[in-house]
Image (cartoon, helix red, strand yellow):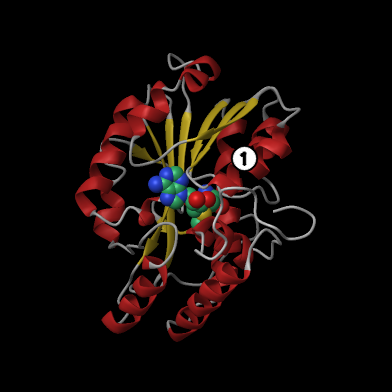
Amino acid sequence: MDDFGRAPAGIDPSVPSVARMYDYYLGGKDNFPADREAAEKMLVIGRQMGNDGREIARENRGFLGRAVRHLAQSGVTQFIDIGAGLPTQENVHQVAQRHAPGSRVVYVDNDPVVLVHARALLADNPDTVVLSGDLRDPGAVFDEPVVRAHIDFTRPFAVLLVSVLHFVTDDDAADRIVADIRERLVPGGHLVLSHIYKGDVEEEVVEASERVYSATSSGGLAGRSLTRISSYFDGLEMLEPGLVPVQAWRPDVPWDVPVQPGRSGILGAVGRKL
Ligand SMILES: C[S@@+](CC[C@H](N)C(=O)[O-])C[C@H]1O[C@@H](n2cnc3c(N)ncnc32)[C@H](O)[C@@H]1O
């Protein structure tokens, strides 16, 4: 939006956008009343599950940052971030380029507002490109000339699907997408993935959250089971500590809250192609 809070041309601010709702959870300013209203409904539903939606969003960002830092420190210098979100603090290129200068980053998102903001932020960063693309068609993303020019697919690269796959509500489609992406990784490449875990939340609460998201830009939301989220790493070597609540993935400050089975939230893991 511009300095007067107006939406860029071609964007309907009355339809809540999952990118702008997430911006609102994180305390950002790039959101409109419809986004805030939908996000507030979700925060209420989250509280019914004993969750603080804002904290979960921050923890998800923390996982993203720690995973990218780990990979950059381990020598990975190429990142494709699909469902990148609106620029916020500690974006992938900032973390990666701090720990591995010259790291190349491709940001992909299907939300036009994300593209406007990301392009403005990255205009003078030659190692980073922003692309309009859809996770549901990985082939189109990977075959995009700008991606082929920016990423050397013969060297290890990481694909980030952080808090985005749950917007693909069809289970078979989600399986196919992740299998396609895993297939494209070369040895030493990584998949960084976080996903809403539905836990043993009551069905009516799940339905209430689905109703909110069905009226957004994503058209829906699918929290999934531990088994299904684990299966996204089939054939990859899962880095320690495996698939865990995002706040428990290599925390900077020891996280000694016991993992409660069945507790909903966001799970995350990093898998490596051998
Ligand atoms: C919850 S935000 C996550 C942002 C960031 N990955 C993070 O975890 O901090 C989800 C992002 O995924 C994007 N998104 C949703 N469905 C998508 C799709 N099918 N293809 C590409 N991006 C998508 C949204 O526009 C939004 O920016």
Viewer-nearest residue: 251 or 117: 117
Q: Measured along the vertical axis of the image, is residue 63 above or below residue 221?
A: above
Residue furthest to the right in view is: 3
Q: Position of residue 255 (x, y in %)?
A: 57, 65
Who's the residue at 60% across and 55% down the image? 62
Q: Quadrant of residue 183?
A: top left
Residue 241 makes an appearance in the image: no
Residue 27 makes an appearance in the image: yes
Q: Position of residue 249 (x, y in %)?
A: 51, 54
Q: Position of residue 133 (x, y in %)?
A: 45, 36
Who's the residue at 40% across and 67% down the image? 213
Q: How many marks?
A: 1
Q: Which residue has dot 1 on it?
A: 92
Residue furthest to the front in view is: 9
Q: Measured along the vertical axis of the image, is residue 248 above or below residue 145?
A: below
Viewer-nearest residue: 102 or 151: 151
Q: What amino acid is found at the position of numbered circle 1 in the picture?
A: Val
Report the side of 127 relative to 208 (left or right). right
Who's the residue at 65% across and 40% down the image? 118
Residue furthest to the left in view is: 172
Q: Quadrant of residue 142?
A: top left
Label 1 CB-ligand 1 distance < 8 A? no
Q: Position of residue 175 (x, y in %)?
A: 24, 45
SS state under label 1? helix
Label 1 crowd bin: few (<14), some (14–19), many (20+), radius 10 Å? many
Q: Quadrant of the C terminus?
A: top left
Report the side of 268 relative to 14 (left or right). left
Report the side of 239 relative to 6 (left or right). left
Q: Measured along the vertical axis of the image, is residue 243 above or below residue 211?
A: above
